[in-house]
Image: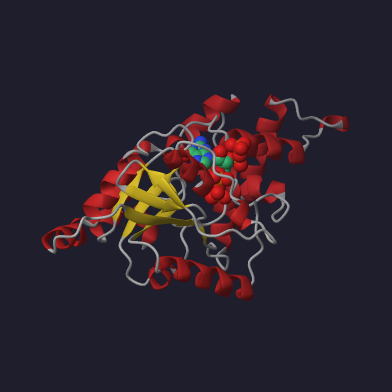
């Protein structure tokens, strides 16, 4: 799903999340482990209004595990509990209820000291489109929850999904918007598939992808596509296009006159990258946080 965000949409999305905040004990901020900065809403601290929060780096199966560890340390260093999961297979997803309960232990202890029977921890998942919110909800629920509440015209009351005995999750997630003003963010999200090509030109996205990949993951690229000559200068556009053409030739994307079909080549590069065929790739490290 790709949503075009306008100021009106943002205000509405923000209001919807803030209404849900009244119902919950903790927010689960879902980010893409490959691009934790670009997949982060720029106003998240303001939106969550000091609600306890667990940052969950999703799609960790596609990210560089060393970089993911660095991100966990970096977020923890800034006072945010953070874990990495793979919602598509369920790896580490079980840690979510455990960590949320830990984060709320003081509140739970207070309830117990007042003689109250602590109820299940109530949580809301928030994140930008395509970060994996529905996949995670279904994984935590252990079944498929139809997200009918998200469709226009379909109204549905809030429902709580039981996650074991100690956690309850709101069945519709909070949808956030990414930081659009920054072009780099747009390209990184397009590389990971969060923004579809209809919005950005496929060749531009693939060009950006190849440029990033030759800088960060040259050996992996060279091996996957069977190309041998690294670009002499990764800032030289012609050199990057030359690498794209090499890939196109290797993949048989040739049009009449022996020219490389760059559009077709671009599609192949992006498809393989997003499917994880180029290996685990992280496009942002905590150093990019500034
Ligand atoms: P959203 O609700 O936040 O919009 O995201 P959604 O769950 O629809 O997930 C977006 C895409 O990301 C889906 O792929 C989903 O399968 C994939 N995904 C979610 N979590 C993970 C994960 O931890 N690892 C990996 N590798 N992929 C994940 P899709 O191609 O759009 O749909 P589908 O073909 O899987 O149905």
Q: Where does residue 249 sit, x and y in percent of width and height?
A: 72, 28
Give the residue drawn at x 66%, y 31%: 247
Q: Where does residue 2 sit, x and y in percent of width and height?
A: 65, 54
- Its colouring scheme is secondary structure
- Residue 103 versus residue 128: which sits nearer the camera? 103
Q: Residue furthest right?
A: 256
- Residue 95 versus residue 273: which sits nearer the camera? 95
Reply above or below: 150 against 228: below
- Residue 220 versus residue 270: which sits nearer the camera? 270
Give the residue drawn at x 56%, y 52%: 189
Q: Quadrant of ligand 1?
A: top right
Q: Where does residue 37 sit, x and y in percent of width and height?
A: 44, 57
Reply above or below: 183 against 228: below
Q: Which quadrant is home to the C terminus?
A: bottom left
Could you tell me if residue 124 is visible in this image?
A: yes
Reply above or below: 52 against 258: below
- Residue 193 versus residue 137: which sits nearer the camera? 137
Residue 138 located left or right of residue 269: left
Could you tell me if residue 131 is visible in this image?
A: no
Give the residue drawn at x 36%, y 53%: 55
Q: How many marks?
A: 0
Residue 118 located left or right of residue 2: left
Q: Where does residue 233 sit, x and y in percent of width and height?
A: 54, 46
Give the residue drawn at x 30%, y 62%: 52
Reply above or below: 216 against 47: above
């Amino acid at each position: 799903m790709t949503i075009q965000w306008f100021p009106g949409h943002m205000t509405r999305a923000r209001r919807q999340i803030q209404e849900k905040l009244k119902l919950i004990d903790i927010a689960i901020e879902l980010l893409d482990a490959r691009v934790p900065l670009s997949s982060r809403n720029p106003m998240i601290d303001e939106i969550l209004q000091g609600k306890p929060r667990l940052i969950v780096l999703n799609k960790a199966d596609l990210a560089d595990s060393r970089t993911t560890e660095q991100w966990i340390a970096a977020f923890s260093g800034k006072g945010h509990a953070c874990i990495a999961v793979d919602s598509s297979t369920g790896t580490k997803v079980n840690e979510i209820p455990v960590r949320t309960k830990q984060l709320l232990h003081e509140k739970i202890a207070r309830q117990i000291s007042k003689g109250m029977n602590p109820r299940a921890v109530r949580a809301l998942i928030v994140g930008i489109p395509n970060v994996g919110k529905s996949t995670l909800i279904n994984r935590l629920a252990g079944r498929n929850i139809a997200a009918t509440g998200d469709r226009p015209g379909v109204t549905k009351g809030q429902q709580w999904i039981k996650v074991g005995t100690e956690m309850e999750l709101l069945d519709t997630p909070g949808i956030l918007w990414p930081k659009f003003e920054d072009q780099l963010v747009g390209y990184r999200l397009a590389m990971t598939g969060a923004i579809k090509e209809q919005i950005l030109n496929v060749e531009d996205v693939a060009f950006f992808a190849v440029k990033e990949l030759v800088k960060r993951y040259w050996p992996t690229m060279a091996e996957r596509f069977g190309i041998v000559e690294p670009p002499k200068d990764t800032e030289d556009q012609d050199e990057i296009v030359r690498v794209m053409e090499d890939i196109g030739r290797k993949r048989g994307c040739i049009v009449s006159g022996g020219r490389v079909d760059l559009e077709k080549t671009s599609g192949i590069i992006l498809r393989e990258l997003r499917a994880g065929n180029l290996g685990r790739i992280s496009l942002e490290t905590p150093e990019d946080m500034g």
